[in-house]
Amino acid sequence: MLHLILVLSGVTVGMAMPLPDYYSYSTAFGDGSGTEYSTAYDGRITGIRVWEHSNSLIRGIQLRYDGTWTTPVCTSNGNPLEMSLRDNESIIQVSGKYYSGYIYEIMFVTSRGRSLKVGQPSGNSFNIYPTHDGSELRFLSGRQNGYGITSIGAHWAVYYTGDNSATA
């Protein structure tokens, strides 16, 4: 009987434990008027586009997941500034400024130290990043009013490949 208990104990200890939950949300910054948006999509973020209104506020944002661009948030009028991420590169920080109801500046920083900075340095600063080591930006959410982005929040998680292994 003792032998059976030891064997069963070994099975319990050797069983795979569920993966810890490495999701975090960074509270939205900005006024927050208008309609809600989310850039959530399947896959890993591989590119960013940002539209700015004539040296002023942020008018639109679009993310690319693997090879697919999401629908632009707010507007895609004008020429965007764009950054493509390299293999195994991810967004690990989002910073910027908000003022008078709008996001005026946004900067995305990658795991390789590269950044895309768009807009004007006016207003209150924000700096958002994941809670857990190894996490990366998975999607953005917030509000927009058809003219510009009025708030922005970030959703972070460790990216797992199909075989449940984390990638950096």
Image (cartoon, grey):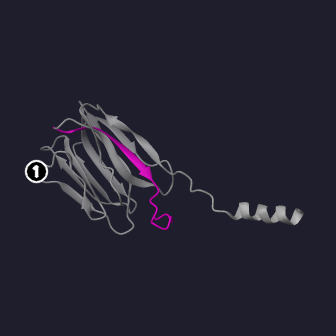
Relative horizontal placement of residue 19, taking residue 7 as reference (left or right): left
Tell me the kind of residue under disc 1: Gly
Judge whether residue 53 is colored magenta: no
Judge whether residue 166 is colored magenta: yes
- Residue at 25% in and 30% down: 33
- Residue at 37% in and 64% down: 89
Q: Which percent across, then down, holds residue 64?
A: 27, 58
Identify which residue, 68 or 8, lies in the foreground.
Answer: 8
**Residue 74 lies in quadrant:** top left
Identify which residue, 85 or 140, lies in the foreground.
Answer: 140
Relative horizontal placement of residue 167, taking residue 119 as reference (left or right): right
Q: Quick one: label 1, few (<14), some, or many (20+) residues within 10 Å?
A: few
Find disc 1 in the rendering and name its residue.
Answer: 78
Q: What range of the chain is rendered magenta?
A: 147-168
Secondary structure under tag 1 reads loop
- Residue at 20% in and 35% down: 145
Identify which residue, 121 or 147, lies in the foreground.
Answer: 147
Q: Residue furthest right?
A: 1
- Residue at 31% in and 64% down: 66
Please tell me how many numbered marks the rendered image carries. Answer: 1
Q: Quadrant of the C terminus?
A: bottom left
Q: Is residue 166 above or below residue 146?
A: below
Q: Quadrant of the N terminus?
A: bottom right
Q: Which percent across, then down, holds residue 105?
A: 25, 43
Q: Residue furthest front?
A: 1
Relative horizontal placement of residue 22, taking residue 92 as reference (left or right): right
